[in-house]
Structure formats: structure tokens, C-alpha cells
């Protein structure tokens, strides 16, 4: 299969922070009764005494995201990390640019993909850089890097630009850059045991049409096994791997060891680090940005009404970073307990270490 590098560029303006605030609103279409909103505070300002942010630490500490280097003529996006005092530190410097940062489990390295063209890039060069900005190197052709739990491998997916064959999954050894083709598939993710992955693959149906199915495979040499979900479903594993959410046709089902139960209407769920809550989207606002809610495992709403996409939880589960894509891409930090805005700045594709 041909593997072709595409160097893509994106222009994103990096601002110190904005002055507006956003707090969740009472929304009758939310999964349940929304929490009351409160006083959000100015983005970038010191958090209030009730804030989840530890004393002396910025609300976005440790967050990585892609943005345009301010005050330069560089037309390529790069990866930045927010320091404890709120300052931004640029960690990549490749001419080709960088996007989609992903922290290694031990927080010593960041994997990244190519800069975007418009809203996405089908292919490009996956790279890696030390957290202090040293040791940047190209690793493999592909996109959407995802670290194995032990930090030794990356899952990437690749589109063959010559033959237009289906998307394929590769596993990359971080130390050697050796790439192994795992076959057709997309939306690949590691299971917490680090020995298995799940992914979607296009399959033939009994009526001669095509549909997506979810598979699980044990590495390095296992055969893909269909998970048994409905066609066109996707799965989202809990942090300990004991259960998972199934998304199908706008609804989420929680599959537990003792069976399945309906969870909520919604999509794009993201588990909290301790596995006790789920952030999900349940509709779109007038700008086509997903409206968000946090639910407990009984399906009860903690809060709802904030907006955003590409959500990532802080490692301690007290904050959530989201991307606001229009009118200009911004990163927004939400209080995970209330949905209130703590801080925001121009940028895209936020990533906290899991």
C-alpha cells in the first residue's frame, strides 16, 4: 500500500485569552434536569475560591493544543503547552506544522499529526517530541496517533492516496519507528489492558449492502473478532475496561458485565478519568456546535448547556477542555462540576494527559 506524506498548513490565531464568559443554561432538551448556572469569572483570571483549580495553578495547566505562533510569519500551526502560571510554551517547531497532540501516559512525550487542511487531513507525518520541546522527530506516515497504555506504541490510521483503498490501521513502535499493518479499519483505540484494540471496519451485510461493525483484536497476532454490536455502532471503553458505551442511532447504551441498559440520548461520550461520569453531546446549537452535558453512571444529569467539541478531561477529573470551532477556533476550560467557563484562548484540538 502506498504511503504518501502530505505536508498541510493551517492558520490559527493565538490570543492571550478572551473576555466573555459562558455558563450552562437550563435546556429542556438536555438528557435530564440541568444544574443551575453560576458566576463564571473572566477567562484567564484567577479562579474563585470555589474553583476546582488547585491554589497557585492555572485552570489549563498541562493542556496541550494546536495554535498559530503569535508574532511570527510562520503559516503552520504548532503544539503549545500551558504552564502552571498560565503562560504558553511552544514545544514543536517543524516547518510542516503540527496538530492533534497526544500526551504519552508518563507525560514525557507528545505525539502529533500533520497540520490540517480545512477541517481535516487524510494523511501526513506523525511525529513525536519530548515534553520540554527537545528531540522532535518524524515517526511514521499516518494520522490520529493514540498511545498504548505502556507508552511504547502508537496506533495511527492511514489513507492510501494512490489506490483509494479503505483506511488501514498501523501500530508504530515508538523506539524503533517500526510500523506494522493491522489491516482495514478506523477509529482504532487501545483497551486499558494494552494487549487489545477495538476498531470499526466496513463489512458486507446479508442483503448485499455494506455497514460498519466493531471488532476487537489482540496484538500482535490475534484475529479480529466482531464485538456483536448493532451495525453502524461505535464503542467507548471505560477507563478500567470493565464496561463500555455503545453509540447507535443517536442513543447511548451502557454495556456492563451483567448486561446492557439504556443510558441517555446523545453522542460523542467521553469518560471521566475515574469512570464515574460521562461527558456527552446531545444536540447542536444554532452554530452547529454540540451542546454538552455531564451525567453520572445512573444517567442523571450533573449539568448541561455548555457547548464545545473534542473534549478532554483534566487528569484529576475537575476540569474539561473543549474546542469552540466558530467563528474562530478557541480552547475553553470548563468546571467539570458545573460547566462554567474558567478560561479560554485561541487554539484548537485540546489534549490533557489521561
Image (cartoon, rainbow, N blue to C red):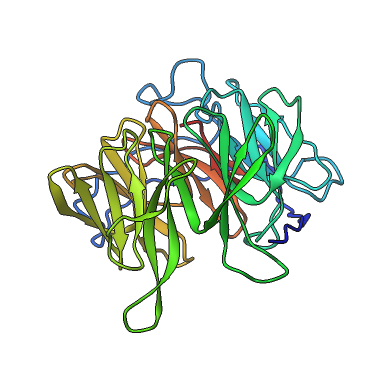
**Where does residue 150 sit, x and y in percent of width and height?**
49, 27
Please give left or right for residue 190 compared with residue 227 in the image: right
Residue at the spot 31% in from the left edge and 30% down from the top edge: 274
162 to 117, vertically: above or below: below
351 to 287, vertically: above or below: above
Seen from the viewer's position, the closer of residues 311 and 121 is 121
Q: Quadrant of the N terminus?
A: bottom right
**Where does residue 179 sit, x and y in percent of width and height?**
65, 44
Examine the image and state in which quarter residue 202 appears.
bottom left
**Where does residue 99 sit, x and y in percent of width and height?**
66, 46
**Which residue reaches farthest top?**
56
**Which residue reaches farthest left?**
258
Seen from the viewer's position, the closer of residues 299 and 347 is 299
Residue at the spot 53% in from the left edge and 52% down from the top edge: 324
Seen from the viewer's position, the closer of residues 71 and 249 is 249
**Which residue reaches farthest bottom?**
207
Examine the image and state in which quarter residue 273 appears.
top left
Please give left or right for residue 329 compared with residue 98 in the image: left
Amino acid at each position: 500500500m502506498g504511503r504518501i506524506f502530505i505536508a498541510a498548513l493551517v492558520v490559527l490565531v493565538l490570543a492571550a485569552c478572551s473576555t466573555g464568559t459562558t455558563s450552562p443554561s437550563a435546556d429542556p432538551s438536555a438528557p435530564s434536569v440541568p444544574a443551575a448556572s453560576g458566576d463564571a469569572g473572566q477567562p484567564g483570571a484567577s479562579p474563585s475560591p470555589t474553583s476546582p483549580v488547585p491554589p497557585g495553578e492555572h485552570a489549563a495547566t498541562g493542556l496541550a493544543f494546536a495554535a498559530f505562533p503569535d508574532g511570527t510569519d510562520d503559516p503552520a500551526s504548532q503544539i503549545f503547552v500551558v504552564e502552571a502560571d498560565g503562560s504558553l510554551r511552544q514545544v514543536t517547531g517543524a516547518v510542516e506544522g503540527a496538530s492533534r497532540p497526544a500526551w504519552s501516559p508518563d507525560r514525557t512525550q507528545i505525539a502529533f499529526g500533520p497540520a490540517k487542511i480545512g477541517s481535516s487531513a487524510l494523511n501526513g507525518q506523525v511525529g513525536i517530541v519530548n515534553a520540554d520541546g527537545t528531540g522532535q522527530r518524524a515517526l511514521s506516515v499516518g494520522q490520529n496517533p493514540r498511545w498504548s497504555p505502556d507508552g511504547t506504541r502508537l496506533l495511527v490510521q492511514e489513507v492510501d492516496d494512490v489506490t483509494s483503498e479503505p483506511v488501514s490501521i498501523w501500530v508504530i513502535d515508538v523506539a524503533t519507528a517500526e510500523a506494522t499493518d493491522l489491516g482495514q479499519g478506523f477509529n482504532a483505540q487501545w483497551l486499558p489492558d494494552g494487549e487489545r484494540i477495538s476498531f470499526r471496519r466496513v463489512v458486507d451485510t446479508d442483503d448485499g449492502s455494506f455497514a460498519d461493525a466493531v471488532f476487537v483484536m489482540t496484538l500482535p497476532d490475534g484475529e479480529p473478532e466482531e464485538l456483536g454490536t448493532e451495525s453502524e455502532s461505535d464503542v467507548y471503553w471505560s477507563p478500567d475496561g470493565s464496561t463500555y458505551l455503545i453509540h447507535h442511532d443517536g442513543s447511548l447504551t451502557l454495556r456492563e458485565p451483567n448486561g446492557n441498559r439504556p443510558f441517555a440520548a446523545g453522542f460523542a461520550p467521553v469518560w471521566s478519568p475515574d469512570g464515574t461520569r460521562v461527558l456527552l453531546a446531545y444536540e447542536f446549537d444554532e452554530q452547529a456546535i454540540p451542546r454538552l452535558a455531564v451525567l453520572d453512571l445512573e444517567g442523571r444529569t450533573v449539568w448541561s448547556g455548555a457547548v464545545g467539541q473534542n473534549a478532554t478531561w483534566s487528569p484529576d477529573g475537575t476540569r474539561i477542555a473543549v474546542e469552540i470551532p466558530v467563528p474562530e477556533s478557541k480552547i475553553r476550560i470548563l468546571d467539570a462540576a458545573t460547566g462554567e467557563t474558567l478560561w479560554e484562548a485561541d487554539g484548537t484540538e485540546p489534549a490533557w494527559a489521561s
